[in-house]
Image: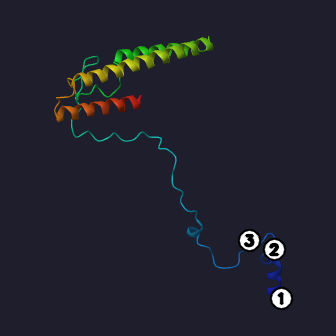
Amino acid sequence: MEHRRHAERVPAPGVPGDTRVAGPVPDPAADAPEPVPDTAPDPMPAAEPEPAAEPELTTAPGSAAAPGTAAAPDGLFDPAETERFRERWREVQSAFVDDPGGAVRRADALAAEAAEALGRAVAAHRRALSDGLGGGAGADTERLRLALRGYRDLLDRVCAS
């Protein structure tokens, strides 16, 4: 009779409210989902690249570079010109609250001016590279290699802008 009372208190498997499951106790590790690869971009910037095997040569802003010499890798503008553009941009931003339409027009004009200045800076760097070859026909292989490296550096800087 005792057995029957116990059976009456425990619902049969498959009955609503039954928390028992027939079979062996499951392994929690086996039920864990498969790890999903992280495809989100890393919020931290990439580590600094290894230094180049050959030291980069630099010239003062605005001076002509010889073939193979590269201007400072920080940008195509001299620091003073960069700061002027940034200061004007801050002025445009602060004017937005009082005159949104005017601020957008000034931003467009500033962007056009910066693009023109960028074109002039790239042209000056290209001229410095090609002028250093002296026509290119009689340039030795080492000068040509250095010039090619200068063009690569210029293109990298343009693409980074």
Circle 1 residue: 1
Q: How many marks?
A: 3
User: Sequence-wise, which precedes: disc 1 or disc 3?
Assistant: 1
Q: Residue at x 45, y 19 (%)?
A: 115
Circle 3 residue: 19
User: Sequence-wise, which precedes: disc 1 or disc 2?
Assistant: 1
Left or right, 15 with respect to 89, comes to: right
The residue tagged with tag 1: helix, strand or loop? loop
Residue, far front? 137
Q: CA distance from mark 1 to mark 3?
A: 24 Å
Left or right, 114 with respect to 72, comes to: right
Q: CA distance from mark 3 to mark 2?
A: 9 Å
Q: Amino acid at mark 1?
A: Met
Q: Residue at x 35, y 15 (%)?
A: 80
Which percent across, then down, holds residue 5? 83, 82
Q: CA distance from mark 1 to mark 2?
A: 23 Å
Q: How is the image coloured?
A: rainbow
- Residue 60: image quadrant is top left
Circle 2 residue: 15
In the image, residue 50 above or below residue 134: below
- Residue 146: image quadrant is top left
In the image, residue 73 above or below residue 123: below
Residue, far bottom? 1
Instruction: Pick the residue in front: 89 or 28.
Output: 89
Indicate the quadrant containing the N terminus: top left, top right, bottom left or bottom right: bottom right
Which percent across, then down, holds residue 81? 38, 15
Which percent across, then down, holds residue 24? 64, 79
Q: Residue at x 41, y 13 (%)?
A: 84
Comparing marks 1 and 3, which lies closer to the viewer?
3
